[in-house]
Image (cartoon, rainbow, N blue to C red):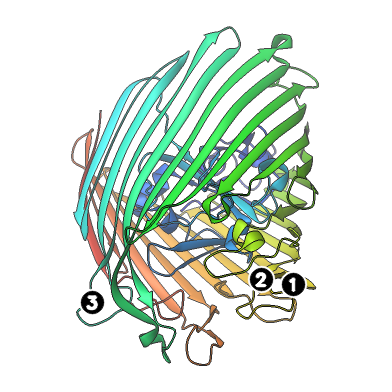
Amino acid sequence: MRLAVLLSTVLLPFSATAQEPYVLDEIIISGGFSPIEAQAYGRANTVITADEIEAQGIRTVQDALRSVPGVSVSSTGASYTQIRIRGAEANNTLVLIDGVRAAAGDSEYILTGLETANIDRIEVLRGPQSVFWGSDAAAGVINIITNRGGIGQQAAGMVEFGNGWAASARTSTRTERGGLSFTASTRDDKGYDYSDTPGGDKDGIRRHTLTLAGDHLVGEGVRLGFSLRGSRERYDYDATSWTATTAEEYVIDSSDFADRKEFGGRIFAEMETLDGRLLHRLSYDQSRFQISRNDGPWDKARSDAWKYRGIYGLDGTVAEARQTVALGLERQRDENSIASDQRRRSNSVALEYRGRFDRLEVQAGLRHDANDVFRDATTWSAGVSYLIPDRGLRLHASAGTGVVNPSYLELFGGWGAVGNPNLRPEENRGFDLGVETMVLDGRGTIDVTYFHEDLENEITYSGTPLSNGTNYYNQDGTSTRRGIEIAGRVQVTDVLSIGGSYTYLRAKNPDDSVEIRRPRHEFGLNAEYLFADGRGTLAGELRHVSGNWDTQWFGANETKELPDYTVVNIAAGYDLTDRARLTGRITNLFDKDHSDAWGYVSQGRTAWAGVEAKW
């Protein structure tokens, strides 16, 4: 997996002794109000490309994120996976699909069977991002970008069999003025028994997704477009026993299931004025989420957002300017059936500056959110990237603040909990410092980043009602998170490349107790080998996790360290023709027992084989 954003094209243009500046990378990331070249971006980030996903045989987004530095992925069964960036809570990470919130209302996005079919890349932006993305982006952003197709007509499809089956198909048509793309995918994963009960039923996931997107240049400098995504999923899960005294007794085999519906859409209009020096973009986003458990009533959530972006080139057109300023205006509203008589609204204004000065790149932003339910918030962000070409170095640093608003459940209560309307938003502040260096005469790159983040007003649940009768409160003091992220890749030979990542994390509550489900050490190693003149690929991945703590919600109700574990996955592919490819993969090759949470086992060795086609 390409774990540093410069790895794909930086390795070739120059060596460690080169005198020329970096050649611009083809990888473009959504690092603000407009796209930015990867090597100009000062904030720590990772880009996972479609080629890497294919080579490693990765079929779900949650599995794609497991080897990203600074990211902790924990699952209580495959149908409930949370993502934590730099030790923050899962609701501090904002998940986007083509720039639109994947979750709706106030909810964090729980990953289940979100597929990698038709994904062009996954961008992971670490550190406070609220200036550009608002609440819930206090620790970082995961932006999943789908493939819209190239010039001409394209089509592709795949089918896969193993512990169930999966299929997907996509088609696109595009000219210089615009295009249209459509994707359909379905997966019936039979899963496994989370409870590890002898003779227990498998807990599977069945998911169907349709996406449709298009854009068209309707006049000189005016473009209209849209994107739509809908998913329906049914997944099985096991119950828990509050009378259990051991991990083996805590999760019990049951026939529970849930139905889940997701919708995300955007319509937009772009217009260039002042001969290209001013770019306007107006969009309307909508996200909807519904879930029903065991054929019960549907819990629903919805978010709506109007957004305006105005970008002005200070010294030329927006596309060519070395300095730009941007204005962002947003009006957002969300609702949730947990508190059907309540609505949350906010109006926001934000400013961004970008400057390119020879070897120095600068980004800075400021945002103010006016909220109608809780306290207003002002956040800021700054990042720099500096190139030292004669030493083969790039220095990067960033700092900023972020906020996370209280949820409906925390504010108003529900499901037996009593809310606290006096809760304050959580506030995160942090910085990182990093250096990226060329190694082995330009055949490889290593990036090392130190990060330091502090969270104030962390919202916590109290099982026993507090003196004010509520179950939620803001912790006094500071929740601290410190760590190091290391990522690298080297092209050993023309046919062999090796990559790796390591994260050290120290995450503590204000009382110095350890934060749960945030491993102290995570190490990943992967390799890709080409054979048969490049027609075949063989890839392997090793992942080691240690120092992971979780609360034992049984017996003495203590927080204890989980056993360390190491998992190995392999994948292979072979081009039968220029249009057809045979694929195969085995996850958990050595069938190792492991767990991210007490009582929940993870899946054993599983094999899949399939065929991909394109035309």
Three-letter code for the amino acid on which mark 2 is drawn: Thr
Q: Secondary structure at mark 2?
A: strand
Q: Quadrant of residue 429?
A: bottom right
Mark 1 burial class by Cα count in 10 Å: few <14, some 14-19, many 20+: some
Q: Nearer the viewer, residue 436 or 132?
A: 132
Q: Quadrant of residue 222?
A: top right
Q: Pick whichever of labels 2 and 3 is earlier in the sequence.
A: 3
Name the residue rendered at 25%, 65% in the picture. Answer: 606
Q: Quadrant of residue 184?
A: top left
Q: Is label 2 in contact with label 1 (beta carbons under 8 Å)?
A: yes
Name the residue rendered at 74%, 79% in the picture. Answer: 467
**How far apart, in angstroms, are the residues tagged by discs 1 and 3?**
41 Å
Relative vertical location of residue 409 with respect to residue 493 in this rendering, above or below: below
Three-letter code for the amino acid on which mark 3 is drawn: Gly
Q: On the image, numbered disc 2 is attached to which residue?
A: 460
In this rendering, does residue 185 appear at all?
Answer: yes
Give the numbered dot on residue 200. 3
Q: Nearer the viewer, residue 193 or 26?
A: 193
Q: Is residue 434 left or right of residue 184?
A: right
**Where does residue 178 sit, x and y in percent of width and height?**
46, 17
Q: Pick whichever of labels 2 and 1 is earlier in the sequence.
A: 2
Q: Secondary structure at mark 1?
A: loop
Q: Nearer the viewer, residue 584 or 330?
A: 330
Three-letter code for the amino acid on which mark 1 is drawn: Gln
Q: Pick whichever of labels 1 and 3 is earlier in the sequence.
A: 3
**How far apart, in angstroms, are the residues tagged by discs 2 and 1?**
7 Å
Q: Is label 2 in contact with label 3 (beta carbons under 8 Å)?
A: no
